[in-house]
Image (spheres, grey):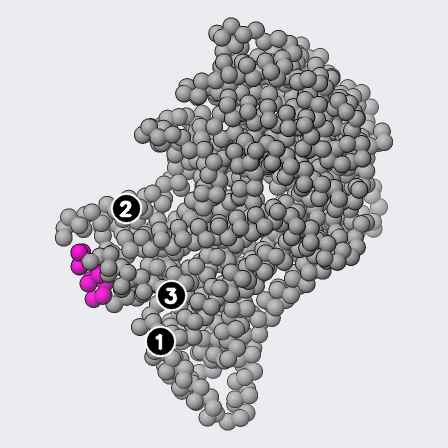
Amino acid sequence: MKLGMIGAALAVALMGTSAFAQETRLTIATVNNPDMITMQRLSAEYTAANPDVKLDWVVLPENELRAKVTTDIATKAGAYDILTIGTYEVPIWGKLGWLVPFDDVPADYDIEDVFPLVRAGLSVDDKLFAMPFYGESSFTMYRKDLFEAAGIEMPEQPTWEQVKEWAAKLHDPANKQYGICLRGLPGWGENMAIISTMGNTFGARYFDEEWKPELNSEEWKTAVGFYVDLVNNYGPPGVTGNGHLENRTLFAGGNCAMWMDATSAAGYMFNKDESKVVDTVAFTNAPVGPVPKGNHWLWAWSLAIPATSQNAEAAKDFIYWATSKEYIQKVATENGWAAVPPGTRKSTYAEPEYIKLPFTQPTLDAMNTADPTDPTAKPVPYVGIQYAPIPEFQAIGTELGRAIAGAVAGQTTVEQALDNAQAAADRIMQEAGYY
Amino acid sequence: MKRSHLGHAVLGHGLAFLMFFPILWMIITAFKTEIDAFSMPPILFFEPTLSSLNEVFARGSYSKFVTNSIIAALGSTLLCLLFAIPAAYQMSFFPSKRTNGTLLWMISTKMMPAVGVIIPIYLIFQAAGLLDHIMGLVLIFFLMNLPLAVWMLYTYFKEIPNEILEAARVDGAGIVEELRFILLPAAIPGIASTALLCTILAWNESFWSLQLTASNAAPLTVFIASFKAAEGMFWAKMSGASMLAIGPIVLLGWAMQRHLVRGLTFGAVK
Amino acid sequence: MAASLQGQGGTAVAGRGLAKKAWSRQRWTMLALIAPAVGVLLVWMIVPLAMTIYYAFHRYNVLYPERFGFAGFRNFSLLLNDPMFWGAMGKTLILVGASLIVTVVLGIILALVLEKDFPGRSIARLMALAPFFVMPVVAALVWKNMLMHPVYGLLSWILGTIGLPVVDWFQNWPMTAIVIIIAWQWTPFAMLVFLTSLQSMPEEQKEAAWLDGANAVQMFFKIILPHLSRAITAVVMIESIFFLSIFAEIFTTTGGGPGQATTTLSYIIYTRAFLEWNVGSASAGGLFAVILANIVAIFLIRLVARNMQNPEKFG
């Protein structure tokens, strides 16, 4: 491969770039989320239309992929041409000069069609460093049949206090019906996604204006205490093992009365092969606490090109294809509108077939109001709702997530857990030289 | 006596079944639909379907992963034997004061945790062009297993009576002939079980193989990782992929288990 | 064994009797036999170790390559002052110790049962052996999801059916759950070594041990266990090398949690290297892991070395 690439580069240098029909191999690193698996399947159409391009897929779970791709890009090993990364990495890596900017987006791609908040999340100094493949915010999914039976009316904007009340009412563990399902699996992209939004709306923040971590503040204690109490009393067993997908399975299996999670999960609830709640699921805003801010997150899985890629132009072409309107249409014809990659383009939501699905309008509202520049009650030095886009956050968020899981499991109190996480965060920030 | 015989057979099969059960359950699940795989109470009688396996095959080129695994496991094992047999022969038949120390030192090289040295090794591999190259994996697995191979062979060779070799030496056989015609035939169970152990360890190694490969050299441990996490709740597909990943090595292990029972002595046989 | 020892003595005498030239040629041959293995292992040990020591004294974060510089003992002192680090040391020892005990005990039981002939014994052996061939990641996935899942797992269904409370393995018994997975994979290995060892026991002794039912327990402790002692040492030695660096099982199931319940030394090094990208700290942790491994090893090697040097003890 390496030799081949050098050979190809030499040949190109010798012959000039014109009329050279060398096969281009693109190595694509991607997470194994179902939308990406669909992309891998549909890419056969792309290679059929571009016979000189061959695609090599590296499909891994999020954590493994992040570790590999970061090592690769930081050491300039250059094994990949296309990376699947999120709104957390793009600003950091873009700033480091690790990514190829998209500064010549073709007109027919219609970049204005892409949600502005998503575009902003993928830009550094107004330069776009990645194209969104699917975007998500978070909201409340609930079972309208159970709510009706219990005589509860779901308002458009529930509060966490109300949620707790309802969860208590609807919790029936003997029949494997749990009041509330929330992520509990430790990780900054797992339990911390939901807990961050709870922290925001309870008035907490990750760092003060001087980048000093504030993880054991009173606000965090209240928020985390509320969370631990909620999942331990009204959640399914094994909360600390449940990430996004485990909860999705529980909810689709009809085991949860409420689930606050990614808007992108809603489409699966309408897949009759997987879901028992096709007719009973309903959607509303993510709950708020005392502070009506930062209660729903913003995230976009996006495709980017590392600066080390030898095939940046070919890679761009593929990315334009995979994030285009046409691609979305293609998925719609293949798998139905409920399964299209959500949260990236206005035109998707202008599609009459799509917007009449029950989850699309709430998703659109959430996407349009999730403002990463103003997530917290007190001022913060970062832009991001459920994360702070600094390299250290990954470790800090994971430490905090693990500590909270420990509190859920009853190994420590909430106070101890937050004190431990604060100590770890303090060490990490000090070592990184913030203060 | 007869009843105790029967009792013993029941006990033996019962325990063995308990050990095997997780694998059996995985195989059964691989032939279920996703919905059946989840059903509680568990469904025992169902119409087997190949749909999950088909999807696993459609997702990626299993043949590429399995080829890489075979090359990496067998290549590293061959190298191991090539280096370990002469060393073990020397240490067991011509021991010196240093032999014990050398052996213990060799084993101690296995104690460096992979996670602690991965970044230095990654940088070396990058400089040498071994990243995502199957030879890189062969090399790593070879180094990883060599100490164990030397030790196993050493303990096995020690049980071979020296007289056999001496008789050959009297007949004027050189060292190569002695190794090839006298020692190797006598040591087949030991060599076979060493080779099998090295192959198993290389086949199942997941940390190095995940970090040091991308697409070209990725073995089955990477294949299985792609069905992890996000697919954690797609148990039928996960089971199908798992079955495909462990199938070859389990069959090989079973085929050679007779040697394993005779060869894994670690000097523990009187 | 005794015979082969005498044989070796004979060789040594013969060696001394050889002409000087032949002797020196033989020395070269000896060197040629062992040098390749020793050579590659020497490189394999020195290069990573030297690099690890080098990085352990440097400030090096993969994400900030420009901030590279000498750090003195800072990486070590930060690590030693981190309560999590000492906890991880303890967790590592607990994990290794518990897994060793379980595999050895179960391995002996299985070996004793499967050593005696009964109809279909070879099939039973194959079944019992199979877990050893299973990839750690696969083992962890199967146990975590299909067997130990608190809602959909088979074990929770079985417990529920017989009226017992459902056990939430990875939340309330994380270490136990991981030890179970490890033991499942490694018990067959222990069983194999014990089987090999049992087979070398004289028939009459075994017959006596099994026939005298009244004294089965005594026989076990007086005859079988002493016979197995060397095999046990070997199993303990090999397994501790692997258990000290257990990683995939933890990574796949608990991710070191909940809290720090399953954060072992390898896992802490992993988080330093791949979450914080702090190569300096990870390297310092790596050196501590080597030290810990060597402490454990010295303890074990003493046992093994004693056995290797006094083979006549095993009569």
Answer yes or no: are tags 2 and 1 on the same subunit: no
The residue pinned by badge 3 equals C230
Q: Check the image and report above or below for B188 versus C99.
A: below
The residue pinned by badge 1 equals C312
Residue at 61% over, 27% down: A224
Instruction: Give the camera-side residue of A299 and A44.
Output: A299
Question: Which amino acid is tagged 2?
Answer: His
Chain of residue at mark 1:
C
Residue at 70% over, 26% down: A204
Mark nearer the viewer, 3 or 2: 3
As measured in the structure, the alpha-carbon distance from the residue carrying label 3 to the one carrying label 2 is 28 Å
Q: Is residue C139 visible?
A: no
Question: Which amino acid is tagged 3?
Answer: Arg
Task: Please give the range of residues in magenta.
Answer: C203-214
The magenta stretch spans residue A18: no
**Labels 2 & 1 near each other (Cβ < 8 A):** no
